[in-house]
Amino acid sequence: MISYEEALKLVDDNVSTLGKTEVKLNEMAGCYLAEDVIATMQSPQFDNSAVDGYGIKTADLTSASETSPKHLKLLSTIAAGSPKELQISAGEAVKIFTGARVPSSCEAVVMREYCREENGHVIIECSAQQGENIRRAGNEYKKGETVLESGIKATPPVIALLASLGHVKFSVFKKPRVALVVTGDELVEPGNPLKDGQIYDSNAYGLSAALNSMGISDCKSFIARDTREETREAFEKALADNDMVISSGGVSVGDHDYVKETLEALGFTTVFWRIAIKPGKPVYFGILDGKGGGRKYVFGLPGNPVSVLVTFHQIVKPALRKLAGGPFFRDETLRIPVGSALKKRPGRLDFVRGTLKRNPNGETAAIPTRGQESHMLSGLAKAQVMLHFDADLETLNTGDPININFIDWND
Ligand code: AMP
Ligand code: MG
């Protein structure tokens, strides 16, 4: 059996990013940028005011204070969006609003809170530094500068930044098209009555929701009874228009586990089957290169609902991220104390689901949630972090350091 690290490396080595496409800004959430963002103009574009206030010459206010306020002649008002450029001279001020262009003759803007108006004058109770409250043209970036690098996720600030540069569309990597196959004779669609021995299919819902959270929507799911024929038929349908198929169940060593042999019969190369992790030991990863180019990927995840989502989070998500043009590995593990003692047999890396809690001494510790078995969704549902209880360890005492990663369904 391979280790978790070896499995991740094999996934990384075998997954390549999809091609590029252009999308409108309001359709790009969840995509990764396929080109650097080069500034088409400087930011800010022009000197503008950071506050509502009065543009002045600093020398006029050198000795201004609450007890000795200065009176300046008010020339005019400049609102945001106004193209006005006017000259002020010593003893004069101009009323100015946040975001409005600051005339070059103004040396600072005094906040409105320190001023009052009277008879065409503004009375100011404080002094001002050169440049105070002026957002200088180009002080964020200059025209032609690389503002963001390709590969960054189109998060709300990234999309807002593209809009601020006037883009309507931008180049992104294609999102992976994904379908699901859920296997099992015992499965019933929620909403229908259960007969003895049957259970509701929760994996299709959990996986669809996990994909949705990553911005991959409209995933079809195909249910296969535990026969060779239905398993093959479901995979053939699921693979038809998609880059990746994620299946649940039927991948272990049971008499009715047909996933691996079905995929091999369909021509898939098995990259790995079985990883030294818990939960999720039977995970399968296979690839098939299409005749017309384009690779298909299948992750055969175990059936247990917790195993499905844990292995999706820890193994499939990096693959989807890379396909979509994002980073495969992220520096997301932290080392913190474990909040209670842990025990296991050595040999497999145990992904313990946990929450974070601050100790009385101010240190944050990771506490396992109640319900750690692989059918216990409630324990995963409450968890914030995944504790990595190393393969070769048998025990950890309270306070021992442990690596954790955040459970983040969105990225
Ligand atoms: P399997 O890997 O097919 O042997 O399934 C392992 C366990 O997961 C069994 O208890 C199954 O009933 C359960 N299981 C399999 N598929 C699903 C599903 N789609 N939803 C909920 N539980 C499932
Ligand atoms: Mg099964």
Image (tube, grey):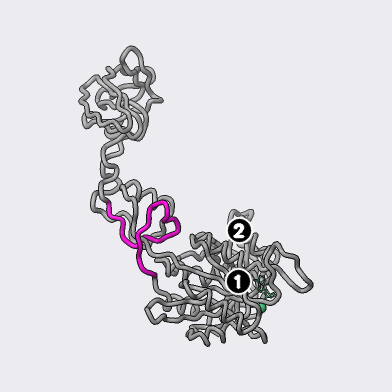
Q: Is mark 1 within 8 Å of ligand 1?
A: yes
The image position of residue 333, as x and y in percent, is 50, 66
Residue 220 appears in the rendering = yes
Q: Is residue 114 left or right of residue 249?
A: left
Magenta span contains residue 32: yes
Which disc is residue 308 wearing?
A: 1
Amino acid marked by disc 2: Leu
Magenta span contains residue 96: no
Q: Residue at position x 34%, y 56% from top?
A: 170
Which disc is residue 129 wearing?
A: none
The image position of residue 243, as x and y in percent, is 46, 72
Looking at the rendering, which quadrant does residue 280 occupy?
Answer: bottom right
- Can you say whether 311 is above or below 118 in the image? below
Q: Residue at position x 57%, y 79% from top?
A: 233
Q: Is residue 242 left or right of residue 281?
A: left
Upstream in sequence: badge 1 or badge 2: 1
Looking at the rendering, which quadrant does residue 404 occupy?
Answer: bottom right
How many other residues sit within 10 Å of disc 2, few (<14), some (14-19) or many (≥20)? some
Q: Which residue is mark 2?
A: 356
Amino acid marked by disc 1: Val
Ligand 2 quadrant in view = bottom right
